[in-house]
Image (cartoon, coloured by chain):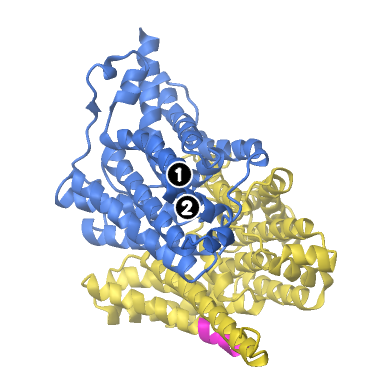
Chain colours: A yellow, B blue
Amino acid sequence: MRGYGWLVGAGALLAGLAVLAIGLELAGHEAGPALRALWSGAFGSWYALTSATLVRAVPLIVIGLGLALAFRGGVFNIGGEGQFYAGAIAATWVGLSVGGLPSPLAIAAVLAAAVLAGAIWVAIPVLLQVRYGVLEVISTLLLNFVAEALTSLLVQGPLQETQRIYPQSDPIAEAARLPLLPGTRLHGGLALALAGALLLHWVFRRTLWGFRLRAVGLGPRAAEIAGRIDSRRVAALALALSGAIAGLAGGVEVAGVSYALFQNLSPGYGFTAIAVALLGRLHPLGVVVAGILFGALEAGAGAMQREAGVPAVAVYVVEAVVILAVLLAEAARRHGAATLAALGTARAVPKAHG
Amino acid sequence: METVALAEGFLSAAVRVATPLLLAATGETIAQRSGVMNLGLEGVMLTGALAAALGAAGVGAWTGAAAAVIAGMLVAAVFALVAIGARADQVITGTAITLGAIGLTGTIYRQAFGAAGAGLDLPTLAPVPIPLLSALPLLGPALFDQPAPTYLGLLAIPAAWWFLWRTRAGLALRATGEAAAVARASGVRVRLVRAAATVVGGGFAGLAGATLVLAQVGTFAERMTAGRGYVAIAIVVLGRWHPVGVAIASLAFGAAMALQFLFQTLGLGVPYQLFLMLPYALALLALAGVVGRVRAPADLGKA
């Protein structure tokens, strides 16, 4: 079944690219050059790979890991975008005032603030869910819009740069910036993302909590009755952790890429990460691969727009098709399994129905 | 006199802003009563908005509205195919549909109207004053001097109520949402009912998108629905899955959004972002107050 997962992922990606190619041809573009631009923008050179693809992959992987954690527990966190902004806001705030600290300490302070902010932001849906039974799907979604408006308010208000002209913050202190790979724009966030994936892999595989999480995700009632697991508590913690991790992604983006806060800091990373988590089949190492693929798509989309005149937003269609294709493949497998099971039952007890 | 004019202006704006929410939420009420939560509503509405702009630019405002309804139903049909036909997870399917709609509308819009994205000059649906009634003080202009979609939205409230509680089809639909297994056992074709309810809801959301373009803004912009589809879903919960409750909740949100215009008229220097946050923050507060005391259709969201 492991091989099947990779096959589904590859097939879904191909389906997405095929839909893009057909759509481009229908719209009067030439699909060939557009797809070539997409490829070269993503993997065409060392610089494209490191400074475009991997730089975009980092936030997708980090948020995607958090979402994989939440989805495994059966919790739908659709608020990664808002938690990312909460983390970015806190990281900027702290990053502006840690110039006096040694760099490792400054970076640690910035990232810790981001994690905390993500956790605080997601605490609202957690509280609403636990205390009032409000669906986390709706509450996390609605908070995305609040976070975006809050960012806009801050960069035109208290966090606006000293000149008070542009709607963005001042750059954060040099000490708070993540180290770069020489000659590229790739920052230390990638190492953090990979370490996070390994850590999560270990949590899922080797810890009791990871086992409980999966049990709750598969069936909260069964987990309570057969496993004596406090499902609500496990689910609430999963939601809180996923929010904190998305906050961290926002902090990493500020400390590694933008060095400042501004509107539209995220081109929808929180939503794309849903596709990443799903395509990675909620497996931490799968999320890394899927994150790099989607980072490549987003990086290539920019090149496609510059070189072939195809709007970069077109890649959202690819992402949507990928998600839907994975869902359909899973449905087909369930259907196939059900048919097999039915056949097995029929063969084992041939007279049961007679 | 000044105050009366101000109040009339505010109420009128509130109803105008509430109309797309009312339409989308009424359609989603029907879908959720059948057991389907369509998070793709945001994308359906956005697609409806673009279809309305294309239709209006090509032919006329009413063609645009019709195109929006059809486009909304088509996008909802894709959702139904995956979430109901293949029994995939509704939340993830809906998110994918919205993501795809953002990409599709953005691409088509730039293709059709140029990358610069200059404001379009589209034919719009002008207010149609109803004789006598529109002259009533305060509520007259708000309820009876509005573009046609507002009247459609207001008529949809009793229509949805009558359908859900006074027809056999409505009973079957509610049974599907409350106890799918029981409905199935009594001969209701559960997945067909859900698919139909979802597609009808899509038509409403498409019209909601058209209203935004043709009766409010007069142009299309990328991501112009700005979360209204999600707010509509929250409104369904706040309105306790009942057309009348949904209408009241929609108007409350319209009023919250229209506060922005009132404050601008009064010249109070409040940052506009606070008004952008208000509807969402309000929705969260209201959900906290309401949800514990109401019950969703028991089989909502279950495959």
Q: Give the residue at the far left of this rendering.
A: B59
- The foreground one among A275 and B39 is B39
> Residue at the location (61% across, 86% down)?
A354
Q: Give the residue at the far right of this rendering.
A: A228
> Residue at the location (75% across, 74% down)?
A204
Disc 2 is placed on an element classified as helix
- Residue contact at pointers 1 and 2, CB within 8 angstroms: yes
- Residue B121 placement (x, y as % from top left): 20, 43
The reply to whether the magenta stretch includes residue A260 is no
Marks 1 and 2, Cα distance to the nearest angstrom? 7 Å
- Residue B275 placement (x, y as % from top left): 49, 34
- Residue B164, numbered circle: 1
Looking at the rendered image, the quarter that the N terminus of chain A falls into is: bottom right
Q: In the drawing, does residue A198 fall left or right of residue B69?
A: right
Q: Is residue B21 visible?
A: no
Disc 1 is placed on an element classified as helix
The part of the image, by quadrant, that contains residue A40 is bottom left
Predominant SS of the magenta segment: helix
**Segment tinted magenta in the rendering:** A1-8
- The foreground one among A87 and A280 is A280
Nearest to N terminus: mark 1 or mark 2 = 1
- The foreground one among B111 and B52 is B52
Q: Which residue is mark 2?
A: B173
Q: Chain of mark 1?
A: B
Vertical order, B259 against A193 (above or below): above
> Residue at the location (40% across, 28% down)?
B14
> Residue at the location (34% across, 35% down)?
B155
Q: Are marks 1 and 2 on the same chain?
A: yes
- Residue B63 placement (x, y as % from top left): 19, 48
Q: In the drawing, does residue B64 fall left or right of residue B49?
A: left
